[in-house]
Amino acid sequence: VRTGKTVLENLPYENTHFNPDFDKKTRHQTRNIICAPLMDGGKPLGVLQVINSLGRPLFSREDLKDLELFCIQASLALLKHRMLQELQDKNQELAESNRLKSFFLSAVSHELRTPLTPVLAWSGMLSDPGMDDETRAEGIREIEEHSSHLANLIGDLIHLAELDCDQVYVEPQKLNLMELVQFAIDNKKAMMDEKGINLDAANLREGQWIFADEAKTSICIEQILDNAIKFNDSSNGKI
């Protein structure tokens, strides 16, 4: 294994590495031994040992060459099997990745349509010259809130694309946790209003500071809040 070379040992009992107890297992007295390494790209996989019993002709150099050839073929077979297994694993990973991407795109299309629908609807209604000022102000407010939500979704997609390309940059700094949470609540107000949810943030305390990346921490907080809104029971309207 250390040298990567085949060894022919004609005096096994004089070799300190030979264990005489092995004869008890084979029920034969050892005459000579050939040890050949099994290699994988220069890395040892193991050793193939062929033992010749007393009373038989000594292993020759030709026998050594034959065993070397056999070990090369065996190593190639093992390498082929390993590469085939790795290829199958990669194919499974790729299939799972494609499945998740399809699911993700389906979810994203739904998420993007949710805030986009009222924006388009109110945009068309605001062109009505007969609309009263109060309704017009409400429409502008709805467009602003849903546009902000839409912008956040697009920002999340950009961050996910950066993650997928291993282009993530972290800029840690001292942050006020209460301000981040309140900012997330303000961004999700339109979603909560649609489901009749009222989020009480009165238990937030001032002076809670963290050391983290502001943009990425905000995304995490908003995602948690977003899931809470989606899966909240609208019958009680409480998070």
Image (cartoon, grey):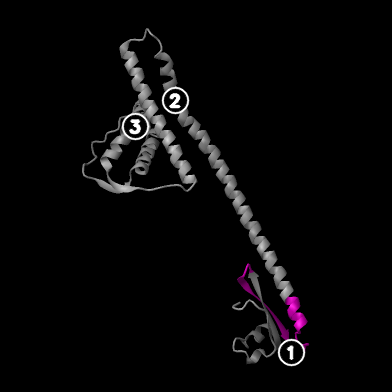
Percent position of residue 28, x then y: 71, 86
Percent position of residue 223, x then y: 39, 39
User: Dot 2 corresponds to which residue?
Assistant: 116
Mark toward the start of the polypeptide (3 vs 1): 1
Percent position of residue 127, x then y: 41, 12
Identify the amino acid type marked 3: Asn
Percent position of residue 122, x then y: 41, 18
- Quarter of the image holding residue 68? bottom right
Q: Is residue 5 above or below residue 21?
A: above
* Residue ID at (42%, 36%): 155
Distance CA(mark 2)–CA(mark 1): 88 Å
Q: Is residue 172 above or below residue 114?
A: below
- Quarter of the image holding residue 180? top left
Distance CA(mark 3)–CA(mark 1): 87 Å
Judge from the rendering whether residue 224 lies leftward or rightward of residue 34; answer left or right.
left
User: Dot 3 corresponds to which residue?
Assistant: 187
Q: Magenta stretch: give its range.
A: 40-67
Identify the amino acid type marked 2: Leu
Quadrant of image for the C terminus: top left
Judge from the rendering whether residue 2 lies leftward or rightward of residue 211; answer left or right.
right
Q: Is residue 187 magenta?
A: no
